[in-house]
Amino acid sequence: MAKSSRKYRSFAKAQGAVRAIAPIVILLTGAAAYAALKVTRPEPKPIESQEKAWAVVTETVEPRALSPSLRLFGRTESPRTARLTSGVEADVLNVSAREGDRVQTGELLVGLDDREVALTIAQHQAEISQISAEIELEKEKHANDLTTLEHEQALLALARKEVERAQRLAKTNVGSQSQLDAARQTVERQTIAVDSRQLAIRQYESVMARLESRLRQAEAVRNRSNLDLERTRVTAPFDGRIGKVSVSIGDRVKNGDLLVSVYDTSALEIRAQVPTASLPLVRQSLLQSRPLTASTLVDGIRVEAVLDRISGEVRAGSGGADALFKIREGSPWLPLGRTVELVVKLPPVSDAVALPLEALYGSNRIYLFDNGQMKGVKVERLGEVHAIGRERRVLVRSDQLNPGDRVIVTQLPNAIDGLRVRVVEG
């Protein structure tokens, strides 16, 4: 029993010694393995630091004479716009005009009932006939007065001779005093007859003047009625296009009522406000008889115009003056009041380059591509170029820009001189 106890205690001591030595052995083994790996590892290559190159797009420039442009907004109008109104009071019989139709000079647009006017003309014509008959009667009467006057004067001469004979007979006591008095009465009566006839002849001119005045007045009224008759047929005053029709068949219109409006398509203009800063250049072009040209794209159709004049009145609160551009091409179908974007071509400037807006930094700086780096160049801003259907570009000029230079047209937020860049396809 004592012997078994001693064996158990010996075994326990040996087991405790192993547990104390095991961690030390493991640590020594790990250290030896680490030292071996460190000695046998390959030497790493040093990493070289390399600056990033930013991707950019460039454009090759060729300085030359280019024209800046002015972008305006305007409305179409026509100085030859006729508002055709009724000249009489009548019923509308037919309306052949339709809004938007093209019409030619003299083409019937609206027809009015002419029966009332025709009756008025007949009434005035009857009055003219009556006055004309009075004039003819007065002429015949005058001719008769002239003939009768000769007879009256002859009878007066005979009566005076009868008085002389009666006086001679009375002196010789052959004739009586009563015969002499009777002869004198005959002379007086005949004298009154001659004077009356002469007065009628003298009044002929004034009577004829009065009758002719009445005749002219009646003819004027009739002619005016004839004009009213013509006005019952409302026709196109010129070649153009119908803007608006204000009546329909059966309407009763009065004198002055609007019937239809028509405008001359060959006189179409675009009214656009020119900013105050650009007015001197626009006025100068007119004074030098070199008017500016302009263009616009309306519904896919190109319209060409030329500066015709500047308005003589400036609206209150406006930032410029209205310029009127006469349309030269592409106008027959344009409606009045259409808002259009107008690109005005200004006089050319030399040594200019047109660049995208992204190429400009601030107001006067661009960058060139120079051996993989950005090189800043100061430029003079000359204006903008607005091409119909294309992007808007800025027009610049600089003594440092040469033919063949490559301008960076990519906007970089960290752009500085010397920044590394690489060119990619745009």
Image: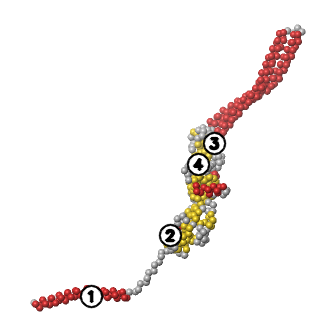
Label 3 element class:
strand
**Residues at badges 1 and 3 in contact (C-beta under 8 Å)?**
no
- Label 1 to label 4: alpha-carbon separation: 110 Å
Picture disc at residue 189: none
Query: In terms of sequence position, does the residue under pointer 2 or pointer 1 come before the other?
Result: 1
Picture disc at residue 243: 4
- Label 1 to label 3: alpha-carbon separation: 128 Å
Q: Is residue 224 visible?
A: yes
Percent position of residue 190, x then y? 81, 18
Q: Residues within 10 Å of mark 4 (few under 14, many from 20)?
A: many
Which residue does the image show at 62% across and 46% down from the upper left?
82
Q: Quadrant of the rendered structure where residue 35 is?
A: bottom left
Residue depth check, mark 1 versus mark 4: number of the one nearer the observer: 1
Residue identified by numbered label 3: 233
- Is 382 displayed left or right of 288 in the figure? left
Which residue does the image show at 66% across and 37% down from the upper left?
224
Q: Is residue 341 above or below residue 186?
A: below
Residue type at mark 1? Val
Residue type at mark 2? Ala
Q: Quadrant of the rendered structure where residue 194 is?
A: top right
Label 2 element class:
loop
Q: Is residue 387 visible?
A: no
Residue identified by numbered label 2: 415
**Residues at badges 4 and 3 in contact (C-beta under 8 Å)?**
no
Q: Is residue 184 above or below residue 221?
A: above
Label 1 element class:
helix
Residue type at mark 4? Gly
- Label 4 to label 2: alpha-carbon separation: 57 Å
Query: In terms of sequence position, does the residue under pointer 3 or pointer 2 come before the other?
Result: 3
Residue depth check, mark 4 versus mark 2: number of the one nearer the observer: 2
